[in-house]
Amino acid sequence: MSRVHGPGSRLGIMGGGQLGRMLALAARRLGYRVHVYAPGGRSPAGQVADVEVTAGYQDEEAVRRFASGVDVLTFEFENVPADTVRWAAEHCEVRPDAKALATAQNRIREKTFLSDGGFPLVPWAKVTSSAELSGAAARLGYPAVLKTAESGYDGKGQRKLEGPGDLAAADLPPFPGVLEAWVPFVMEISVVLARGADGSVAVFPVCENIHRHHILDVTLVPARLDPAVARRAEELASAVAARLEFTGVLAVEMFVLADGSLLVNEIAPRPHNSGHFTLDACVTDQFEQQLRAVCGLPLGSPELLRPCAMANLLGELWSRGEPDWAAVAAFGDARIHLYGKEAAVAGRKMGHLTVLGATADTALERVRAARAALG
Ligand code: AMP
């Protein structure tokens, strides 16, 4: 039986981005002391932590010292090297474990794990060379999408292939990678859930996700789906978490096809951008759930209080100077979340807005209007 780390304990977070920041805020609200380890200083998470350590993930001495100073360690970023996780685990409890991280940080391992478990996947092939790529493309057909095995996110490290002429394109992502058939989905969804070390599971309602330029733009909850399909999505995500023997918060992204069938796209072993609505719309939010799960506390209720829509605020909103905060504040029903990032680069997630409504559609209309008011 794993230990319980109650309020007053020291929570370590690897990674300094907005997911770490929102976890740190949840932990401080519950009386934890928060230590953040991030390669860049004054990170979004470090700004709201008790302690921020600025060092690289390969700095063994710094990693060991950091892990010795906390009771339990978790991640806001899954691409922490395996060695870093191993060093840390010699000094404190680490959740989720190295196996879950290793599975989620490499698309070949992730798809192998999912296909061994019998989960429905987009047709795919592992590709490690140009010859394998041509063979895989001939089998899967066009269009197809080539994705690098590691470190890709928000559409980075991906290239759509429209025909054999693209097989030798100069901007292909590096091998090893996976080639996927292009899926004519009718909706993209995600299921965010928390799983405790004792196997208990709390599943948030299914999110409907709309992307722009491969980056999440808006999330609507509940997803506008047949309830039977939503239930299947929740079951699928719970089964993935169980097979991974996962402890923490897990997000499972899926494609919904016209006939209602589901395909798993990818998994994230941490809170997810699509789960930000939980901060304002659920009894317990995804960050508090992560804290509870990794600290061995019982999970909170994931119940949705009202339908909700969330809109991301990307760096391009700053392209003509500071957005008009007074205009969005005038929307009394929009909640503003900002991540404290210093440089607004196009495509960078700077914050988000949430609006609750009588239906997800009315909330969507309001959140889009509030965002448009920013300029
Ligand atoms: P990913 O980084 O794998 O989540 O991909 C980013 C986005 O690209 C997804 O959310 C989809 O909108 C799109 N996409 C990725 N893979 C496929 C695919 N096999 N078929 C169609 N669209 C895809």
Image (cartoon, rainbow, N blue to C red):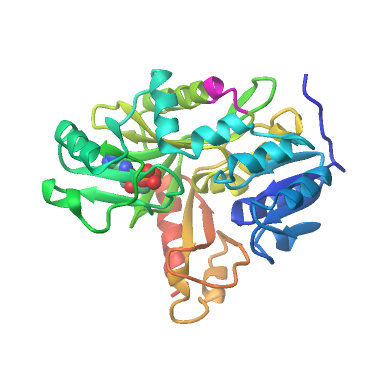
The spot of residue 243 in percent (x, y) is 52, 20
Where, quadrant-wise, is the C terminus in this rendering? bottom left
Compare residues 141 and 9 and report the one nearer the observer: 141
All told, the count of numbered labels is 0
Residue beneath the point at 44% across and 31% down: 109
Determine whether, in the image, residue 365 is placed left or right of residue 63: left
Classify residue 9 by image quadrant: top right
Q: Is residue 373 magenta?
A: no
Q: Is residue 220 above or below residue 204?
A: below
The structure residue drawn at horizontal position 58% and vertical position 47%, both measured from the top left corner, is 77
Lateral position of residue 256 relative to residue 222, left or right: left
- Compared to 47, does 129 lie above or below? above
* Figure quadrant of the N terminus: top right
Confirm whether residue 185 shows in the render. Answer: no
> Does the magenta stretch mainly form a helix, a strand or a loop?
helix
> Picture coordinates of residue 330 (x, y %)?
55, 70
Image spot of residue 180 (x, y percent) = 27, 37
Question: Where's ligand 1: which quadrant?
Answer: top left
Magenta range is 241-246
> Splitting the image into 4 quarters, where does residue 301 fall?
top right
Q: Is residue 48 above or below residue 144?
A: below
Residue at image x 28%, y 51%? 159
| Residue 245, magenta (yes or no) | yes
